[in-house]
Image (cartoon, grey):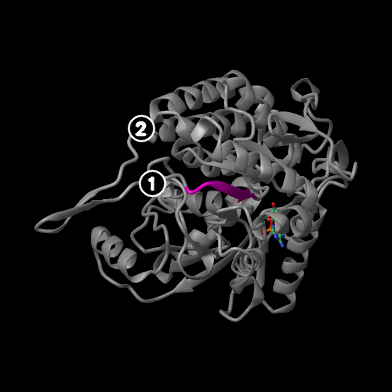
Amino acid sequence: MTNGEPSVTNLPTIKFTKLFINGDFVDAISGKTFETIDPRRGEVIARISEGSKEDIDVAVEAARHAFDSGPWPRLSGAERAKIMMKFAELIDENIEELAALDAIDAGKLYHMCKALDIPAAANTLRYYAGAADKIHGEVLKVAREFHAYTLMEPIGVVGHIIPWNFPTSMFFLKVSPCLAAGCTMIIKPAEQTPLSALFYAHLAKLAGIPNGVLNVVPGFGPTAGAAVSSHMDIDAVSFTGSTQTGREIMQAAAKSNLKHVSLELGGKSPLIIFDDADIDKATHLALLGILLNKGEVCVASSRVFVQEGIYDEFEKKLVEKAKAWVIGDPFDPKVQQGPQVDKKQFEKILSYIEHGKREGATLLTGGKTVGNKGYYIEPTIFSNIKEDMLIAQDEIFGPVMALKKFKTRIVTKNLDIANTMSRSIRAGTIWINCYFAFGDDIPFGGYKMSGFGRDYGLQALHK
Ligand code: ADP
């Protein structure tokens, strides 16, 4: 644990703290602000204007005007693409500052944000910029003397309600297809992580995105978030977050104007490891699957099933590796795991760990907090899991793995296993011999209570 002073050289100065509406940074109508907290030490970074229903109303009015009368939906795809490319370039020019904002606001690893999250987000913009002039309908031969055509139109004003675990990736996977299609939008970032979203608003303006097209209104879920999902003049709402909040958003959409809804919700993803796996690789993937971004990942490998032939060796190696995992300040390049996003998540994870112990699961390693400041939790692995235990059922959203042994061999050859398993599991994504294999061109989304609609891929243009 290197939980001491951060390498202060990387710390950003906070430039944007107000709501971004119709091309300007403005105070909330109520004048209220809220604190955004640095989870490394539990200290206040800045006070952010707190958007509420009245601010959402003003932002929607701006977005509606920009959609109904502004240039954005009327530009050619190629013209929108050019501006989106410029936006992507500006992100690349500011990578270090943006990486530092996500690191300080969400406790994410600075070097990973710099190498991955931020440049990948610029590429997401470029991917959809490439699609902006390729959105077209079909001509249908209806009957001998008639034909019909379909026209792909931008849906209108879109509300994006996003979570705090990947503030940058979430922002761009939502915003990019909408920009390409010619929509206008309101983005409600998570109250835990408003900083980078406001910086992106600034870059959008610099890139030449017209006023009113992209509005960013930080605030809390039950106020600002609920004002988006229940608004009568928003045409679609796209949400990523918890299953419970997803239900509320869908209800609000149904009760207001039946706006289009897409939901990317929680999960309890299983990682299944067969006897013929390479143990080094499998333990690495299992650990990365649950510890990447401190387990604050909706597709974290929170349940790991290992076949009995290799179980003992797997468990031993896994625990050894978990013990060597480096926890500490997310600005330190040696560190593999930073603090949980906030006190609420930190306490929630610790209470699940206590629950696991009480329910009789075996705590193989971890389970404790690290340091006496900030929200750090040790990599935690439980074995002897029973299916009805809370830690085997609930999405914990932290560095806590439920490890289970299984017997049945389904088929003998790898390829056969891959094909049989991927067809028999009802899941939005199945990764084989890898984990976190994301791509701008790969549609991403859930089955069952993990939601519906797809982010990424050309499908995101049509959701
Ligand atoms: P968590 O509980 O882990 O913070 P949520 O799913 O509640 O996860 O939060 C994800 C996003 O949803 C955040 O931007 C949050 O402000 C927003 N949110 C929370 N509650 C509501 C709600 N009732 N209506 C709309 N948005 C909400």
Which label belongs to residue 442? 1
Residue that protrudes farthest toward the top in the picture: 93
Image height of 56 relative to 419, above or below: above
* Residue 256, position as x, y percentages in the image: 64, 65
Q: In this orientation, which residue lies closer to the viewer: 21 or 108?
A: 21
Q: Secondary structure at mark 1?
A: loop
Taking the spot 59% from the left edge, 63% from the top edge, the residue there is: 257
Residue located at (65% from left, 23% from top): 96
User: Which of marks 2 and 1 precedes in the sequence?
Assistant: 2
Identify the secondary structure beneath mark 2.
loop
Whether residue 41 is situated above or below residue 142 in the rendered picture = above
What residue is at 74 percent from the left and 73 percent from the top? 355
Residue 137 horizontal/vertical position (percent): 29, 46
**Quadrant of the rendered structure where residue 369 is?**
bottom right
- Residue 398 vs residue 93, the one in the foreground: 93
Q: Which quadrant does ligand 1 occupy?
A: bottom right
Q: Is residue 395 magenta?
A: no
Amino acid under disc 1:
Ile
- Give the residue type that dot 2 points to: Asp
Q: Is residue 447 left or right of residue 354?
A: left
Q: Name the chief secondary structure element in magenta.
A: strand
Q: Which residue is at a point 33% across and 63% down the rendered structure image?
A: 422
- Neighbourhood count class around disc 1 (C-alpha, 10 Å): few under 14, some 14–19, many 20 upward: some
Q: Position of residue 288 (x, y in %)?
A: 54, 48
User: Which numbered tag is attached to residue 133?
Assistant: 2
Using the rendered image of the protein, determine whether residue 331 is visible from the camera's viewpoint.
no
229 over 158 or under it: above or below: below
Q: Which residues are magenta?
A: 155-162
Is any atom of residue 3 visible in this view? yes
Q: To which quarter of the image does residue 310 belong?
A: bottom left
> For mark 2, does the 10 Å Cα neighbourhood hold few (<14), some (14 to 19), or many (20 or more) residues?
some
